Image (spheres, coloured by chain):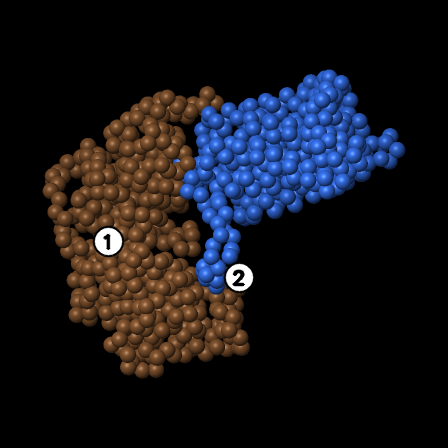
Chain colours: A blue, B brown
Amino acid sequence: MQLILEKRPQASSLMNFLSPVLAIALTVLMGGLIFAAMGKPPLSALYIYFIDPLTSWWSIEEVLVKAGPLVLIGVGLAVCFKANVWNIGAEGQLTAGALMGAIVPIMLAEWQGPLALLAMLLLGALGGALFAFIPAWLKTRFGVNEILTSLMLVYIAQLLLDWMVRGPWKDPDGYNFPKSVSFDGWHLLPMWGDGRMHLGLVIALVAALVLFWLMRHTLKGFEISVVGSAPKAGAFAGFSQTKMVWFCFAVSGGLAGLAGIIEVAGPIGQLQPHISPNYGFTAIIVAFLGRLNPIGVIFAGILLAISYIGGEGVQIELGVSDKTTQVFQGMLLFFILTCDTLILYRLKWVSSKTKNVSAGETL
Amino acid sequence: MPNKSNNHASLALLQVTEITKKFGDFYANDSINLSIKAGKVHALLGENGAGKSTLVKMMYGALQPSSGSIHWQGKDVSIASPAHARELGIGMVFQHFSLFEALTVAENISLALPVELRQGDLSQRIADLSKDYGLPLNPSALVADLSVGERQRIEIVRCLLQQPKLLIMDEPTAVLTPQEAKALFATLRRLVEEGCAVLYISHRLEEVKQICHDATILRHGKLVAEVDPQKETAATLAQLMVGSSVHQVSRQANDQVGDILLQLCHLNQKASTPFGVDLVDLQLQVKAGEILAVAGVAGNGQGELFAAISGEELSPDQTSIIMFGENCNTLTINQRRCLGAAFVPEERMGHGAVEHLTLTDNILLSRHACNDTNAPLNRGWIGIDRSQLDQLNQTIGLDYDVRKSKEDAVAGSLSGGNLQKFVVGRELNRQPKILVINQPTWGVDAGAAALIRQAVIDLSRQGSAILIISQDLDEIFELADTIAVMSRGQLSPIYPASELSREEIGLMMAGSHEQSTLASGA
């Protein structure tokens, strides 16, 4: 007996809608089992993980602060993935954006005012986009797989940041810590609430709404879905595959870079070796969980932000490893991809007779 | 290598009885009988879509028959898979090879062999066998460095190592130079002398006359004749292949021919993919009010011709594609549309239309850049003009009798014929001055085909220039004012439709007009 995947004649549209819900439910269930296996009370652990972060205004704020970059990067990746362009290196583009944007506060420290802040944000987006153009160029010019190149470039960007804050951009008055000067005045984003909420959240929401409109109502959105799902029909419509690759990397790289500069000009306030708890990678989960729909990405971003805060919660209150967050995020991605696959395909046992046959078949 | 003598030559090696293959309601093969004898080359003839591939796949175990039986060496067998077929002694050389370019000849052969045959000095056996059969091959050569003919030899040697009693060859000369083809024929003769049987699939009639002992001819999934090719002429074979019952159509003479609207001047274009066809010095012209049909068996450059004229594939260095007197080599498909041209590709699903999109979205697909008569559909950030798309969809649906489950259905939910009516209607609705349409009624029901053909004739009589690429001779004679024939990327001169017979077209389809042809060397 052998198990194979067989394409379903018609995918259920209801299940397609419910897939993320199902994936979340399965993650919670499996998470409970894992907590139980670790000898922790599963129900209260799950409460601490998923509910507790929403019970105080302080932690809600913290969830929103984390959701900002996830949504910003996630909507860009949603556009990318919709077009069948696989940018896995948003984390690197985030880093590149942070570096480029930090030129203003570090090298032009005297320049203050709203324009300086605007320049920082624009430079951040530009840095992310330029960094994303490397895999775009390699793909369109040489046909190199963008999954590999964009991923490998993440480590290059992170090492570059590490070198910058230990070398040329190290704060001269920083007691030799690997940090840049602290940004001040107009080099920081306006803050609200208890002091951690910042303009980045608004930017993320605007980006999501703009991309929602673009995808839903404009020719560009139409182009993205046609080129991604039916390349030959795309050529018939006169849409260029090459231009689409550049466009996708520009949008997703630019938004990731913007998220990067927002992080350093917002909650962090300076450059340091680690500026992101893997937002760029987690945003991949956000994009899929949000059904590659910018509005869906907003909700998915909030959920994944809860997983960060909840992870910290269980670490503090129950003393489990901080890797729990990654386990939960990994399970979530696993279940959403599994649900999506099983919506399009069904499992089928095939008899051993046919199995022998197909094992011997090389064609 | 197989049977030492021809003792059993009169007994059938493989006997196919009343075999039928249905795909849904469609009979790909309808009660076909075929008997292959050891020591003979048996030809299987037919136009594309006649059911040759289906039949052969059932013999090779890649498809299972809906009904009927197969006898192998007198025993009733059910061939479960290609592996099973190879065990029985049936080998097949496919038209498209499955080789790893980065591996050597010996490595490629080793990969496809059963374990017991991989033992020992395989390279030496390959070298011996290939030399023995006049198929020179260097076992340590990289496949990437080899010509198409040499790659085919790998596939043949791979089959021969398993000592087949029956070798099936699917259009083997389609990819060969004349010299390579000659060498192949010598090998095949050697094989049959040793008692092996060969089933030879082709539509090149001269070849068939040259090397085949028996011939079975299929048309529309039915067996139409079993003949001795030696006693037939290429013309009579062509007649059997394309159908002798000439479908008479009464069509009004066209005396309203105007200026040349579409012209190709010495169009040369290298294929962009490994299995593509190079276009060689194509010349044609279509006048206003005229329908030119390009006949030919699929895969001889029709797809490439369509891509070149539509602008999906640009050839910017030349001045060979002229529309309305304007050189348009560098123009994109949408710029050509804006000049007044419209295009209908061969594949409705995935090329002409997107399966999971609605009909209105599919209208947008080809009309977003130039929507001749009305306001633009693409209004930038304001969004796409949906209400206009709805109107267009309604009009096209009514004018071209597109039957659908709901007004703005998903393209994938329409039947083949209805989707084709929609795809053609979407373009005709623009009243284009130039229409290029590839296989206008391929695989659609008779009613839809009639509607589409009538609509195309009506458009031409209103003064449009129409180029039809088709392999359906009935359709060509029903529609065309003038005819040219395409084979292996070359185009015959243009003849008035009234001066050509089916037989003459059949001969040209087999390559009689080519400048350096295999057929002429026969």
Identity of the amino acid at label 1? His
Identity of the amino acid at label 2? Ala
Q: Chain of mark 1?
A: B
Q: Residue at x 19, y 37 (%)?
A: B454
**Label annotation for residue B102:** 2
Q: Residue at x 53, y 39 (%)?
A: A340
Q: Tag 1's secondary structure?
A: loop
Decide: is A12 above or below B176.
above
Q: Residue at x 14, y 39 (%)?
A: B254
Q: Residue at x 11, y 42 (%)?
A: B250
Give percent across and percent down for residue B186. 33, 74
Residue position marked by numbered label 1 in the rendering: B220
Sequence-first tag of 2 and 1: 2
Q: Residue B307 or A192: which is nearer the viewer? A: A192
B304 vs B102, left or right, is left
How would you rate the neighbour count of disc 1 (Cα within 10 Å): few for under 14, some for 14-19, many for 20 or more? Answer: many
B230 vs B97, left or right, is left
Decide: is A144 above or below A130.
below
Give percent across and percent down for residue B194. 33, 79
Give percent across and percent down for residue A64. 68, 24
